[in-house]
Amino acid sequence: MQICSAREIAAFVEDGDTIVIGGCGRGLATPEALLEAIEQRFLSTGHPQNLFIINSLSIGDGDKRGLNRFAHKGMLRGIITSHFVLTRSLQKLISQDKLEAYCLPAGVIQQLIREIGAGRPGLFTRTGLGTFVDPRHGGGKCSKSCKHELVELVHLHSQEYLRYRPFKIDLALICGSVADTKGNLSLNEEAVTLDCLSLATAAHNSGGHCFAQVRNVVQTGSLPARSVAVPGVFLDAIVEAPGQTIAYDTPYSPALSGDIKPSHARVQNEPSEVARKVIARRAAEELIENAAVNIGFGVPAGLRFTEQRKQLAERIWLSCEHGHHNGQFLGDSLYGAVLGSEALLSSLDQFDFYSGGGLDIAFLGMSEVDRHGNVNLSKVNGKIVGAGSFIDISQNARKLVFCGLLTGADSQVEYRKDKLKVTRNGTHTKFVEQTDHITFNALNAKTNGQEVLYVTERAVFQLGPNGLVLTEVAPGIKPKRDVLAHMGFACKVDVQRKMPEHIFNAL
């Protein structure tokens, strides 16, 4: 097995290559030294140019690292990923139509790459039907310059499916903790496992090459067989990067890799804002014992810190798409990492669990909701944000609880004398006649028998046979004045109860 420098690997990359890249979030299991070396070569020589990159869960710091390293004129011709929140440089290129950009569900991307590695004719799945990745609604295209049809509608046994088409892979760039001199790769000191094996398999079986970045190289025979995630036969060369961190600016931690259980839990408090507390507490009322649960990023994350969640902590099964089961889920720069995880699967295995209907309930965010109950989370204020794992999760969970403020982030409420009072309405209408993007299709949900709730700080809605229905309001809230007047459509009202009074205690 060759042990090379990052510069030597960068020199191997050719103009026009299609590259699959491991890693996610803010540097988790990310081959950052390789990405930096490729960027530096381009800035020095103008090559490699016209690259096409694929990454499932997106990588970046919102500035210059991760996929942002490819955002130079002429360096990149296209990208497939699931969201662009951490890659503002690429967002800018997309808005200027200087990049072929495709946004597909994160799980779909990982499952498609597995199919490519296995030599099968693409991924056949119902995930994405009726959303913006359905070819009838854009096929995941995010820019006018998109030339490829990545998704097609097919019919099997009178059922609609999407076929995500395979493509040839020239290179895979992955990251591990340690490799031996034969190239056997372990991720035992990483916070996530992700889909490293499937990336390596797809590149190798496509006739391409796979390069891995690791913290250390050890002698062959040093690694226990069960610790090897990628056998050396899949790799062409290894780069040793002793300064490699577990995430951007976060050194290796055995508590994050699952090697030890943390002795003390981090202090986790409810959100400070009254509105977000109310949403979290009301959403947590939907938790039930023995449920398999996913809690999304943003507003829904507050649910993790509610008293209801703490009381049920040992009687629900919490997981995230990155592969973790139970433990203390982290946010911000370490989103995707977990302290005290009880089990850590590959993200690909986790997505199989999700897409097969393994989740009993999911708590997710919402940027827009329309009269039909459709949810948009992928295009905000005209800018492509992407869906991440939202489609994989929302389309396949048995029950959904969407969480968000009724009128936008700048709205404010207060709780006084046993009544909730709106002190300022937000400037953004979130409940609209028709969403700009369909990230969640309500008609499909009704067909699939999913139960769907929409929880805001002042009201709760349900998905009814004919669209959205207002079913609960907070104490002191007038449905017409405080709710319906701030929606872009007439909504059916069936208010039979108020939001539970105990969720307003100690606000």
Image: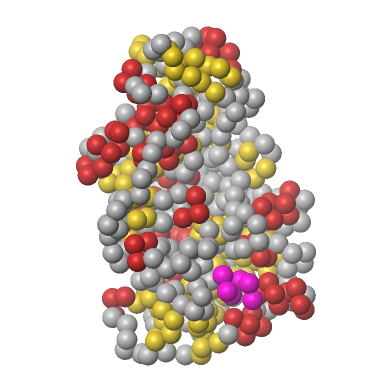
- From the viewer's perspective, is residue 212 above or below residue 466? below
- From the viewer's perspective, is residue 178 above or below residue 443? below
Depth check: give the residue in front, 494 or 223. 223
Q: Is residue 380 visible?
A: yes
Give the extent of the magenta segment. 32-37
Label tally = 0
Q: Residue at x 59, y 20 (%)?
A: 425
Q: Residue at x 59, y 49 (%)?
A: 85
Residue 358 in the image: x percent, y percent?
A: 31, 47
Q: Is residue 231 left or right of residue 76?
A: left
Residue 203 in the image: x percent, y percent?
A: 52, 75
Residue 104 in the image: x percent, y percent?
A: 55, 52
Considering the image in quadrants, where does the C terminus appear?
top left
- From the viewer's perspective, is residue 275 above or below residue 305? above
106 in the magenta segment: no
Q: Quadrant of residue 220?
A: bottom left
Q: Is residue 112 left or right of residue 424?
A: left
Residue 346 in the image: x percent, y percent?
A: 37, 63
Q: Is residue 112 visible?
A: no
Q: Is residue 319 left or right of residue 50?
A: left
| Colour mapping | secondary structure
Depth check: give the residue in front, 42 or 265. 265
